[in-house]
Image (cartoon, rainbow, N blue to C red):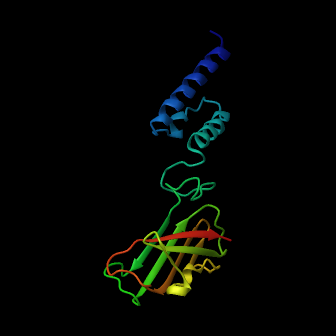
Amino acid sequence: MDTNKKKIIIFLVYVAIFFIATSFRFFQISFFSSPNFPKSFFTGVAALQDYYYGGCTQNGVCESGETQENCPADCQTIVSMNPNVDLTQGQQVTVIIAFNDSRYVTGRQVSYRLLLDDSIVWNSTNGCPLGDNTKVTPDISLQGYVKITRTCIVPKINIGSHKLEATPTIY
């Protein structure tokens, strides 16, 4: 068998292994690290992986090209409220919002839409100016990461624990 046929067979075997591995989500690029293997194949494998996952590596790290829309597993918005139990109307709480998104550039502004219990829009009319969907400067601003902490007043709600959801917009 000539050298070209051997290379083609090896290539097809690697491609078959790639598709089998990605279907079980065990793909590791290091598997293809044979020093004799053509370097151009690495670019093709990376492109196939991006196509298969829709640009999302699903490795828990929000990387370049991954956003909250195309990779929610890696790029998340984390919201916390302290205190978060036995809340009453008029109570002061600290709202902390942090998110990862490769589109965010250090120093840019962000706005938020806040929603309590899936139905109450929380903004300056009922105690939380952070939810006005107006541009704010984050407390921590890094490439791909934002964190902001603000004090808000609990609106008219039932006493108890509540769900707070934040939807960021990047400017």
Residue at figure coordinates x 62%, y 67% from the top left:
143
Asked if 91 appears above or below 29 in the picture, the reply is below
Q: Quadrant of the N terminus?
A: top right
Is 18 in front, or is 126?
Answer: 126
Compared with residue 28, is residue 63 higher up or lower down, i.e. above or below? below
Residue 46 appears left or right of 159:
right
On the image, the x and y values in percent for residue 107 come to: 66, 75
- Which one is nearer the viewer's eye here, 127 or 148? 127
Q: Quadrant of residue 112?
A: bottom right
Q: Is residue 164 above or below residue 7?
A: below
Viewer-closest of 129 and 141: 129
Image quadrant holding the C terminus, namely: bottom right
Name the image quarter holding residue 39: top right
Q: Residue at x 50, y 40 (%)?
A: 28
Q: Which residue appears at 40% of the width and 71% of the height? A: 163
Extreme residue toward the top, this view = 1
Up the image or down, 74 lies above or below 37; here it is below
Residue 5: x and y in percent read 64, 14
Residue 86 at what x, y percent from top left?
Answer: 31, 81
What x and y, as percent, mark residue 156? 42, 84
> Splitting the image into 4 quarters, where does residue 104 fall?
bottom right
- Please count the marks in the image: 0
